Image (cartoon, rainbow, N blue to C red):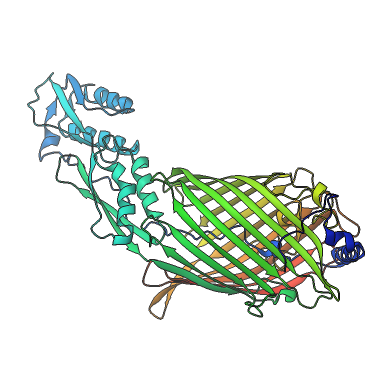
Amino acid sequence: MCLHAPVPTPSGRSPVATSRQPKFRFAAAIFAGLSAASAALAQTASQVTPAEAVPPTQPLRGALVFSGAPGLAAPAGAERLTILVGDVAVEGTLPGMEVPTEALRQRLTAGRIRASELFEAAAELEQAYANEGYVLARVVLPRQRLVDGGTLRLQVVDGFVESVDLRAAPAPVRDRLAALTDPLVGRRGLTLSELERQILLAGDTYGVALGSALQAGASPGGTVVILDPEYRGVTGFAGLDNSLSDSLGGWKFDTGVELNGLLGFGESLYARLSGHPEGDFAAEPVLRTLSFGAVVPLGTDGLTLNLEHTISQTNPEEIDPDIPSEFERSSVRLFYPWVRSRDFNLTTRLSFDAQRDRLDVDTAAGAIPVYEDDLRILRLAADAFWQTETNATIEVGSELSFGLDCCGARSADDTGAVPLSRPGTDADFAKLVLSGRYRAPLGEAWALTVNGRAQTSFGEPLAVAEQFGIATEREISPLDTGTLTGDSGWVLRGEVAREWVTEAGGLPLGLSPYAFAATGAVTLAEPGPGQRETTAASAFGVGLDLFTPFDDSFSNAALRIELGRGVRDDDEDDRTALSIAASYRF
């Protein structure tokens, strides 16, 4: 199947197009009829291709920080002695700690107090330092002779990281972990947020599951950061699900592999293969998506470069004539974590996509192109994550996309005989996507999850590849993936789950039965003949999640079984579906 448009003549039309006008009109007529009559075109290659294939990192494990014993226990009998403190002199006060220091001075000079209160106040000041992020700072009562009316001397020891212990780090990632944590060594006034950031960035290294702890160093105020990384140079996964329509084979198999840190830069090289097994390696598979890419850190502050290329093909069965489609995307992405901590993260992403989407009709005379889109897209995205004190988590995201009429993009003026995928679309466009997820425990064993997405095209029609779909595995899940799309839309889903852990075969097994309900709608900016402007859908059902981790930090297995009912308000059939999705990561 040809991926390149014919070279245009000076008139703007290709020589092939000039001689085949009747065939193009025939293909357009078939395309219009299928669009109006069924959802046959809903699972074209672009509609079933994931937005990205970047591999996940491993979560940090083990203790990150500890406050340490204050060393300010009052000596025996101090509660029976009293003292009148004339003034308090605190040496080494760190920035931002003037208010709690003054509060301590006023407390201890307010009148006669028990001697034990001197130690209590010093310990509380040390805790105030920890609360402000100075987790390595220590408040010390130096040796002194204090009489009534005298001045009490306290000393703040500005704690610091004496060294980072990397003896347990495997050679392929040792230099990368050292580069990320070396900025901590020897720094005075180090705060919890600064300490957390660098250790969490080290934990984000691909192929690494990082354990960490702190222990007292040999120098006064010194702390040793101990890193205990588990490393795996080759990771991957395999999975299957039945989220596709019957015309694409129903079942979809996924597999992927990652090569982590083998070059010593903290990089990950990855490949993904997804599709229906029938004809997966043939020239015209029922469904095949192939992605490969690289994630490379730039420097030691979290900036990351991702290069990725994806090719997806569909050849639906049970449709006459055949309508093969092909989607191809090349992406350059830059990620930067502005805030990286255990409780809050803020990351932005700048990306550029060059993508081509093509649909043909196979006839006795050969393949005739029905539409072809060549888009160049600049995307700006931001994602935030909060974890509250009650262990609830909040995730929000936004992505603003701009189509650029440059760099080989195909505009409405360039179409000739082969149109764009939607009437009224063009190379330059804009759209905004918002997303959110809230998860909170309900008591000790129950949990509530609510997630939603919305998109606006600002009233303009979009190319097929940029439309918004609400029939996904975690939204309107009983409907086949990609079968309900529009230029703008919204979707909301809620789940209530009961969670507990048991054991199977000597391994922990997490069980989580749940009930769900979802609703949403999509809107076409300029609906064509036989198309609805707005289509709404809802779903409800029950399911069961099973999850088991294996002996190491990288291997786990998951299974989701769900029985749901999907209801649409258009002429398409409602659907009751038993959905199954299984995965194994190694």
Image quarter of residue 287: bottom right
Vertical position of residue 7 compared to residue 311: above or below? above
Q: Name the side, left or right, on which 474 lies relative to 266.
A: right
Residue 424 position within the rendered picture, expressed as x and y whole percent measured from the top left = 83, 48
Residue at 72% from the left image edge and 54% from the top image edge = 374
Which quadrant: the N terminus?
Answer: bottom right
Vertical position of residue 174 compared to residue 285: above or below? above
Residue 577 position within the rendered picture, expressed as x and y whole percent measured from the top left = 70, 74
Image quarter of residue 38: bottom right
Residue 300 position within the rendered picture, expressed as x and y whole percent measured from the top left = 38, 46
Residue 159 position within the rendered picture, expressed as x and y whole percent measured from the top left = 23, 38
Q: Name the side, left or right, on which 228 lies relative to 46.
A: left
Q: Name the side, left or right, on which 253 lies relative to 284.
A: left
Residue at 36% from the left image edge and 52% from the top image edge = 202
Q: Residue furthest front?
A: 10
Q: How many marks?
A: 0
Residue nearer the viewer, 483 or 294: 294
Which quadrant: the C terminus?
Answer: bottom left
Image quarter of residue 550: bottom left
Tell me if residue 583 can be seen: no
Tell me if residue 525 can be seen: yes
Residue at 84% from the left image edge and 62% from the top image edge = 16
